[in-house]
Image (spheres, rainbow, N blue to C red):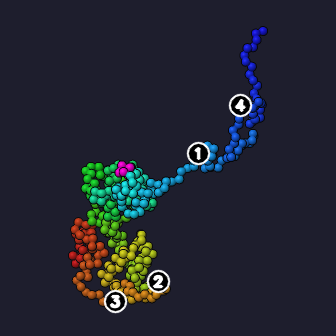
Amino acid sequence: RRANLSPMRRPPSKRPHGSTPPGGGGKKPRRPTADVKLVEPGKVAPKRPRGSVKASHGVAPKRVKKEGGTLLSRIKEVFEESRFVTTEAIMRHLGKDKKEVVLVINKLAANDRIALHDDNGTTLYRWLPDDERKALRERKAKLKGLTTEEKLVYQEIEKAGTLGIGTREVKYVTKLKTGVPKMLERLQKRNLIKWVRTIEAKNKKIWMLRELEPSRDVQGGPWYEDGIFKQEIVDAIKIVCMKYLEEEKEVTCEDMTVKVNRSNVFNGTLSKEDVEYILKALVLDQKLEGYHKLVKSKVKREEGRKLEIKYVFHYRHRKGELLESPLNDIPCTVCPVADKCAPGNAVNPTECKYFAQWMDM
């Protein structure tokens, strides 16, 4: 038979873990350090607490913030000294050159940390508090997807506030010659703006933000609907005022406002100024008279309750006979919207039926 010339494999050693081979040969086991413990066979090594460091590996703990605070906190120190700061002021405080400071400023502006203001060609920076920063981010999210021109149109409508702005004025201030009507239509579809009619011109539309209510100068207050004066609303409120004065004899404007709003004669809530408008019209009608009355009331102050005496304006039924005057019959003297009456306006003497009836008398 041919002899097996392949070398014989040595059977695996059955030495226990950690023991040295016979005769002291081989490498000696590492001597454990004070912080490392050997784990017995069959047991799981205990987990090292999070954040701990092996001393044997020489890993250093995490570094603390540098002395003097982070870059963000150091920049905030500049704005604590002054509300508006310049680039040069930030450079002096940080001790960095202009190129590095500009990079930092751009990053802060992108994160809505600061706002930019122009002061006669000089750029100033203002630190934004949390509430302004939140509002700015909400505004950016609302205008997301708009073109630069559409954002410009929205900005001018926003500036107009409750007075609104017409399409022609938008074209003039934005200097956009074409495309403005389509931009307004798109902004309206996104529920960002709305149009309202004015009392000055029936067919004129003005634009304002969706969440705003038009001012009294635009729509004439609660006596108008779609730019049309509603005489029946004024007459109904006058009746409520006269009936209430029959019960109470004398009232203040505040008391009358509460009474009118509780009567539900008007679909909405009238302010004190609205009701005062009606009461003054009744005074001009010579149905009521107004007067100051001395009123005593106890007022709570820091040193205790004290008696306060002041004059309060009251209304009551007119006493005595009406004064005869040719001016009493002129409708303009008792008209609650006489200040809005002018040629070309929605309220004008040419189309006034009350003025026409008086002229025919």
* Observer able to see residue 196: no
Image quarter (top left, top right, bottom left or bottom right) of the C terminus: bottom left
Cα distance in 3D space between marks 1 and 4:
31 Å
Residue drawn at point x = 49 percent, y = 56 percent: 67
Q: Residue 289 in magenta?
A: no
Disc number placed over residue 319 in the picture, else none:
3
Q: What percent of the width, then of the height, locates residue 73?
A: 45, 57
**Residue under pointer 4:** 26
Q: Helix, strand or loop at disc 1?
A: loop
- Counting residues from the N terminus, which is met first, the one under dot 1 or under dot 3? 1
Image quarter (top left, top right, bottom left or bottom right) of the N terminus: top right
**Residue under pointer 2:** 301
Question: Of circles 3 and 2, which is in front?
Answer: 2
Cα distance in 3D space between marks 3 and 2:
39 Å
Q: Helix, strand or loop at disc 2?
A: strand
**Residue under pointer 1:** 59
* Observer able to see residue 29: yes
